[in-house]
Amino acid sequence: MDPDGKRTSSGEQGAPQSVEFTGHALATLSVADRAWLAAAIERIVPLLGFPVTRAAIELVHDDRMCMLHARHMGLDSTTDVLTFAQNAPSEPVDVDIAICVDEAARRGQGAVQNDGSAASASAPHGTRGEILLYALHGLLHAAGHDDRDDDSYARMHAEEDRILEAAGFGRLFEGGAK
């Protein structure tokens, strides 16, 4: 099911990989940023260590993310990314991911750290780097990674760092302890 409860899975495990960015907030990104994100995703997917059949990444604003967060997590607040895996564990990834561009802009520009506290004045990766980090985070969740306790949090973010460094982006996640 996608975030609105509609079935979107192709159901074909052997289908070619497909990653698509959609959503109203996509229009807020420049053509150059959209092209950069598409190319960046093409660079990281082969480094994941698991097949991706389909990933639909909806870029949303705070209002839609608040609605999705309340509907699916029972929390009346915005968040960075929500993952809706359509695949069973150990199957090729088939996922719907909602990414909040407003949150990405706040964190990517150094307004807040990943724990919500005030950040330093500079965040060199900007909004598009933060969106890339959220997309990778969602793909890892769909493949079975978790970050609910300190150990799994550390493992998941180490895997993000490994993939991003191997793709030439460097470490984008700057959070420490959960």
Image (spheres, rainbow, N blue to C red):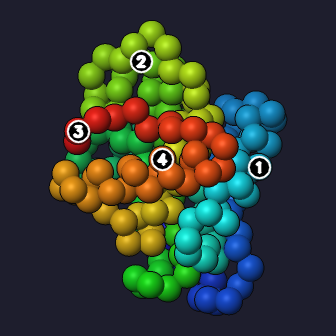
Instruction: Say above or below: 9 vs 72.
Output: below
In the image, farthest residue toward the top: 121
Residue type highlighted by circle 1: Ala
Q: Residues within 10 Å of mark 3 (few under 14, many from 20)?
A: few
The disc label shown at residue 111, or none: 2
Residue type highlighted by circle 3: Ala
Instruction: Say above or below: 159 vs 85.
Output: above
Q: Residue, x 66% and y 50% (percent of image)?
A: 167
- Front disc: 4 or 1: 4
Residue type highlighted by circle 2: Ala
Disc 3 is placed on an element classified as loop
3D distance between C-alphas at marks 1 and 2 = 26 Å
Q: Is 177 on the left-hand or right-hand side of 18?
A: left
Disc 1 is placed on an element classified as helix
Q: Residue, x 23% and y 39% (percent of image)?
A: 177
Q: Give the mark nearer the N terminus: 4 vs 3.
A: 4
Q: Give the mark nearer the N terminus: 3 vs 2.
A: 2
Q: Give the mark nearer the N terminus: 3 vs 1.
A: 1
Q: Is 174 on the left-hand or right-hand side of 101?
A: left
The disc label shown at residue 39, or none: 1
Residue 121 in the image: x percent, y percent? 45, 10
The residue that disc 4 covers is 161
Quarter of the image where the C terminus is located:
top left
Instruction: Please identify the quarter of the rendering in which residue 117 is found.
Output: top left
